[in-house]
Amino acid sequence: MPTIQLEITSGKLAGEGVITAQKKLSQLENVFQDEATRKSMDQDQLIYEVQAYMPVEEGKEGGLYFGNSTIFPGKVNNEYFMTRGHFHTKLDTAEYYWCIQGKGALILMDEEGKTWLEEMTPGSVHYIPGKIAHRVANTGDEKLVFNACWPSEAGHDYATIEKDGFGARLMEVDGKPQLVQNKKEMV
Ligand code: PA5
Ligand code: NI
């Protein structure tokens, strides 16, 4: 018997060793552009939930981790609910994401701050090369669910994004998702 099971339609993981973490709006201070609106909203609102199966010790070279992320639909003002986003601590390590359910965008950024996106729809497979920061936004009105596979030595560097952000944000403009360049990136 394999150790874990993937529920094929929901993308959810079950089995011994699967850990789950939730991110509520209260835990996402300064992640969205409009911090005043974020503060005024229900702080218990669940923004995303992550499951991970990490069969080898964190940081050990040569292993692979497997995960599931679910991002709930919604916006802070006109910015879609999204993950914090990160570079990998061991910068030159890659990752796969693939979309199970819903609609959204994988937002990618290189070390110079150049930011672009790949649309996520059920079945879309996304190779995230090393040295590329990644974050996912839900642009639809149902849950956005994706799975991920990444090296056990990769680690998560959140500090760089907390400090500098991404070069652009995914906003609803005239009823459609649009990458809006951050002002400081435009000079
Ligand atoms: O390993 C990954 O890249 C994903 O499992 C993410 O950690 C997950 O989607 C949550 O995003 P973040 O770690 O940026 O909060
Ligand atoms: Ni990652």
Image (tube, rainbow, N blue to C red):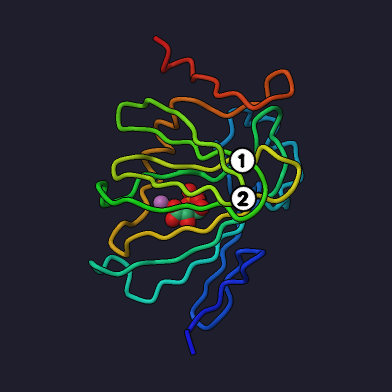
Q: Residue at x 38, y 40 (%)?
A: 133
Is 135 or 34 nearer to us in this picture? 135
Q: Amino acid at mark 1?
A: Gly
Residue corresponding to mark 2 = 122
**Position of residue 115 measured from the top left corner of the image (x, y, whole percent):** 42, 28
**Position of residue 127 measured from the top left corner of the image (x, y, whole percent):** 39, 47
Residue 95, relative to residue 182: is it above or below? below
| Quadrant in which the C terminus appears | top left
Q: Residue at x 29, y 45 (%)?
A: 130
Residue corresponding to mark 1 = 104
Whichever of callouts 1 and 2 sits on the residue coming sooner in the sequence is 1
Outermost residue on the bottom side: it is 1
Residue 159, relative to residue 115: is it above or below? below
Residue 154, relative to residue 42: is it above or below? below
**Position of residue 166 measured from the top left corner of the image (x, y, whole percent):** 44, 31
Q: Residue at x 23, y 66 (%)?
A: 61
Badge 1 density bin: few <14, some 14–19, many ≥20, Cα 10 Å: many
User: Separation of disc 1 and disc 2 at Cα?
Assistant: 10 Å
Numbered disc 2: secondary structure:
loop
Badge 2 density bin: few <14, some 14–19, many ≥20, Cα 10 Å: some
Is 142 or 127 nearer to us in this picture? 127
Q: Is residue 156 left or right of residue 98?
A: left
- Whether the residues at callouts 1 and 2 have beta carbons within 8 Å, the answer is no
Nearest to the eye among marks 1 and 2: give it: 2
